[in-house]
Image (tube, helix red, strand yellow):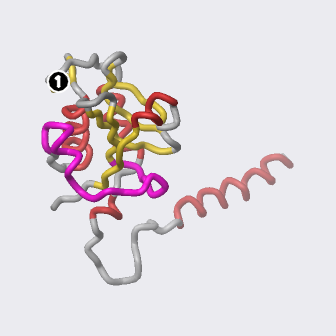
Amino acid sequence: MYKNQLLFPIIISLVITGCSNAPSHIIGSQNRVVPFEEQLPDNHLLMVQFNKWSGTPYRLGGNSLNGVDCSAFVQEVYRSALGLALPRTTALQSERGRSIEYQQVKTGDLVFFKTSYKTRHVGIYLDNNRFMHASTSKGVIISRLDNPYWATAFWQIRRVNES
C-alpha cells in the first residue's frame, strides 16, 4: 500500500511532463521558411535507409539492393530520406552544395575521399565520426572517419542544398 502511494505521484508527474513538452522546432508565433541547412536529417531518417541497404554488396555501376556503388547509394538515400535529387557520379556530387570545415560536419553532410590517384569515394555523415557508405570490400556499412584508412584518404565535406 505504501509503495502504491509513492509510485502514483511519480507516474502522474512523468505522464504530465511527457505530455507538456512543446515541439522544439516552433520558434515564436510567426511561420518562417527554414533553410535546408537547418533541416539536415536526424540519424533516424538515415538509419532507416541504412537498415534497408545494410549488407548490400558493392557493385560498380550498381544501383539496387542486388548491388550498389557508393555514389548510387548516396543518391538513393538522399532521394528516399530527403526527397532531394543528387547527380549519379561521385565527381558531380563533389561539386554540389558548399564545402564545410571538418569541425563543422553535421548529420547528412557528404564526406568525400581520394582513395587512389583517380578514384573518389563518397559517404553520408551520421554522427560521432561515423559515416555510412558502400564499401568496395564490405558493401553497405558504417565506418569511422578516424579509422586510419579513411583519415588518410579524407578529401572534403559538402553540405548539399537544393540549388
Residue 19 sits above or below residue 128 on the image: below
Amino acid marked by disc 1? Ser
How would you rate the neighbour count of disc 1 (Cα within 10 Å): few for under 14, some for 14-19, many for 20 or more? Answer: some
For label 1, the residue is 64
Vertical placement of 134 versus 21: above or below?
above
Which residue ends up furthest to the bottom in the rendered image?
29
Locate residue 99, reporting x and y percent.
32, 56
The structure residue drawn at horizontal position 40% and vertical position 77%, both measured from the top left corner, is 27
Task: Please tell me whether residue 79 is drawn above or below residue 6 in the rendered image.
Answer: above
**x and y percentages locating residue 13 in the rendered image:** 67, 61
Q: Going 17% across and 24% down the picture, which residue do you hit?
A: 64
The range drawn in magenta is: 87-109
> Along the horizontal axis of the image, is 27 left or right of 122?
right
- Check residue 88 for magenta coloring: yes
Looking at the image, which is closer to me, 102 or 18? 102
What is the secondary structure assignment of the residue under circle 1?
A: strand
Instruction: Report whether 69 appears left or right of 106.
Output: left
Q: Which residue is drawn at 32% across and 83% down?
A: 30
* Position of the C terminus by quadrant: bottom left
**Residue at point 20% right, 45% down?**
93
